[in-house]
């Protein structure tokens, strides 16, 4: 390359850049990382966008709600050994919210759930463990001042699928 020429930069998909920004990585740092990785692997500069796409998290986001239950489903999942819960959580799904396994509690947990709903709207799987009481407007089971019925409608209403009302819930 001649001294008066600058290296050609290839555009990276805007969606990928935005995702990394929401994770706290600046566009500049992400592009530098992809370029350095490409160079370290002795690949041509044209591979920078491919490196960026390879870094994308392709795991399916999951929001796991638990209401009136004994946590037996969660416990069975955590004790599985073929594959292990760690294999599933680290390699297959992105467990965005699950009260039984997350470190956050209270307002922090509720905020994590809300952020996951917004970030993955229409793209996440909702798992509901336990019963959802419907009597007295759902007043027999509340989390953070909201009924299990209300939470289920919100979470399941924005989950991947056809947008239909979750089965078995009163309208």
Image: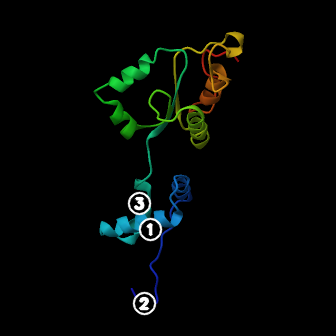
The location of residue 18, given as percent across then percent down, is: 56, 56
Q: Residue furthest front?
A: 106
Way the structure is coloured: rainbow
Identify the mark nearer the N-term, 2 or 3: 2
The location of residue 115, given as percent across then percent down, is: 59, 41
The location of residue 165, given as percent across then percent down, is: 65, 23
Query: Closer to the camera: disc 1 or disc 2?
Result: 1
Q: Quadrant of residue 3?
A: bottom left
For label 3, the SS is helix
Foreground: 51 or 143?
Answer: 143
**Residue that mark 1 sits on:** 32
Q: Residue at x 61, y 37 (%)?
A: 114
In the image: residue 1, left or right of residue 119? left
Q: Residue at x 33, y 24 (%)?
A: 79
For label 1, the SS is helix
Residue 3: which numbered mark, if any?
A: 2
């Amino acid at each position: 390359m001649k001294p008066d020429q600058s290296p050609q930069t290839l555009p990276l998909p805007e969606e990928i850049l935005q995702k990394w920004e929401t994770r706290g990585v600046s566009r500049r740092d992400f592009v530098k990382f992809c370029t350095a990785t490409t160079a370290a692997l002795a690949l041509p500069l044209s591979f920078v966008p491919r490196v960026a796409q390879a870094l994308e998290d392709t795991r399916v986001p999951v929001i796991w709600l638990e209401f009136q239950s004994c946590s037996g489903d969660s416990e069975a999942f955590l004790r599985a050994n073929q594959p292990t819960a760690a294999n599933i959580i680290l390699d297959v799904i992105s467990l965005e919210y699950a009260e039984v396994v997350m470190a956050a509690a209270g307002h922090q947990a509720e905020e994590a759930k809300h952020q996951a709903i917004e970030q993955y709207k229409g793209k996440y799987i909702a798992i509901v463990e336990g019963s959802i009481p419907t009597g007295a407007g759902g007043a027999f089971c509340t989390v953070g001042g909201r009924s299990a019925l209300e939470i289920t409608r919100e979470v399941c209403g924005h989950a991947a699928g056809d947008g239909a009302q979750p089965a078995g819930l009163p309208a």
